[in-house]
Image: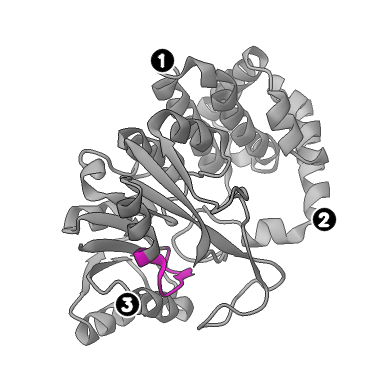
């Protein structure tokens, strides 16, 4: 069975060969590896061409810089596989990841499968090659004998919305190519996985959630990933709002968790709206007022409060007020948190 692996690339030359080789070294050999060079200026494009010259399974698309969504969409349009997976170019995968995901789909009559992933524990950059010290499994998967979860559509959507066990990331999943017909990432916007993954999962009759970690997530502040800015984070609020508008008619019982997603995104917008006051256009101010109205109409659930740290819980009541005083206080809380946890700002990516 042919698997199309889409790798969007932008200025990740120091990490790119590690990523490509980890995909080409898969025990499942029937691959179409689509490298989408999104206007790189650091030699990443030449590395893509070099990989294509050395392995016939590699196809390269060079395009003007248009962002992660456009790069992934170009790869989707070129995909010929029966199944589709994604890898970020500054990450890498274990040798049996796609064989593992494919077996999870076939053995469980699933149309989507997902695996656990590793995250850095102490070191911001991992060595090439086998998993070494400094990474740990993310550990969302519950211990229930085998650890395997097979979910119907409704249960899968519930877990995805709740961000428990099944998350929005495109890169730790494999799905039937047919599920992507008519589905594309939102170009010109960030939080692309929030806007897209649920649409694919919603089309699946069954989702297999597998317990082993097979993907190494490198949260490096480089490459094609999003940067924190007021405009980008407001994109996140919009993405969660649109997901809520789309799913709520069919899943009214998820009103609380769907609203929690919006509120969690707003908690990042509030301090940035104070720090980045130059971005406070009349349109942005109106968006803040609308968001505050949303927060007043949708109180945070106990589950959201329990999932947040002290800084997050202190920020939640401020979201009901769009004025300068609430946003400045949110910024003070945010910066106090960063002083205690500087790695959060340094390593976060989409």
Whole-percent x and y of residue 229? 57, 46
Asked whether residue 110 appears in the rendered view, the answer is yes
Give the quarter of the image for residue 258. top right
Q: Secondary structure at mark 3?
A: helix
Q: With respect to residue 329, does 1 lie above or below?
A: below
Which residue in the protein does label 2 denote? 339
Alpha carbon distance from label 1 to label 2: 42 Å
- Specify start and end residues of the magenta stretch as a single range: 88-99
Question: Dot 1, how many residues are within 10 Å of its Cα: few (below 14), some (14-19), or many (20+)?
Answer: few
- Marks 3 and 2 in Cβ contact (< 8 Å): no
Quarter occupied by the N terminus: bottom left
Sequence-earlier tag: 3 or 2: 3
Q: Earlier in the sequence, mark 1 or mark 2?
A: 1
Left or right? Give the position of 294 relative to 343: left
- Within-10-Å neighbours for mark 3: few <14, some 14–19, many 20+: some
**Residue 155 as seen in the image, left or right of residue 26:** right
Label 3 to label 2: alpha-carbon separation: 41 Å
Instruction: Residue at 47%, 65% (x, y): give it.
Output: 223
Residue at image mark 1? 249
The residue lying toward the viewer, choosing from 205 and 225, is 205
Image location (x, y in percent) of residue 205: 32, 35
Q: Which residue is mark 3?
A: 24
Q: Are marks 1 and 2 in contact (CB under 8 Å)?
A: no
In this view, the mark in front (1 or 2) = 1
| Towards the viewer: 27 or 200 | 27
Q: Earlier in the sequence, mark 3 or mark 1?
A: 3
């Amino acid at each position: 069975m042919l698997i199309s692996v889409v790798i969007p690339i932008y200025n990740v030359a120091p990490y790119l060969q590690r990523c490509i080789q980890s995909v080409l070294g898969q025990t499942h050999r029937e691959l179409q590896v689509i490298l989408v060079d999104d206007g790189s200026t650091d030699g990443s494009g030449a590395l893509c061409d070099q990989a294509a010259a050395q392995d016939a399974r590699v196809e390269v698309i060079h395009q003007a810089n248009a962002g992660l969504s456009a790069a992934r969409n170009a790869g989707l349009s070129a995909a010929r596989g029966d199944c589709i997976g994604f890898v970020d170019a500054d990450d890498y995968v274990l040798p049996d990841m796609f064989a593992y995901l494919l077996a999870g789909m076939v053995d469980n009559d699933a149309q989507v499968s997902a695996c656990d992933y590793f995250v850095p524990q102490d070191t911001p950059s991992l060595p090439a090659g086998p998993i070494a010290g400094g990474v740990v499994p993310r550990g969302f998967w519950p211990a229930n004998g085998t650890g395997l979860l097979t979910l119907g559509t409704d249960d899968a959507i519930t877990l995805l919305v709740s961000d428990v066990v099944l998350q929005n990331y495109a890169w730790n999943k494999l799905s039937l190519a047919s599920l992507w017909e008519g589905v594309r990432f939102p170009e010109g916007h960030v939080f692309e996985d929030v806007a897209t993954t649920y649409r694919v999962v919603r089309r699946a009759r069954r989702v297999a959630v597998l317990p082993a970690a097979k993907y190494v997530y490198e949260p490096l502040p480089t490459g094609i990933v999003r940067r924190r800015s007021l405009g980008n984070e407001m994109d996140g609020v919009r993405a969660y709002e649109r997901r809520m508008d789309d799913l709520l008619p069919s899943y009214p019982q998820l009103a609380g968790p769907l609203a929690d997603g919006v509120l969690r995104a707003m908690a990042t917008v509030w301090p940035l709206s104070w720090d980045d006051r130059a971005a406070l256009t009349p349109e942005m101010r109106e968006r803040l007022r609308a968001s505050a109205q949303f927060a007043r109409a949708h109180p945070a659930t106990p589950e959201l409060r329990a999932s947040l740290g002290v800084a997050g819980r202190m920020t939640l009541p401020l979201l009901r007020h769009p004025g300068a005083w609430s946003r400045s206080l949110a910024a003070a809380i945010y910066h106090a948190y960063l002083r205690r946890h500087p790695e959060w700002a340094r390593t976060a990516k989409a």
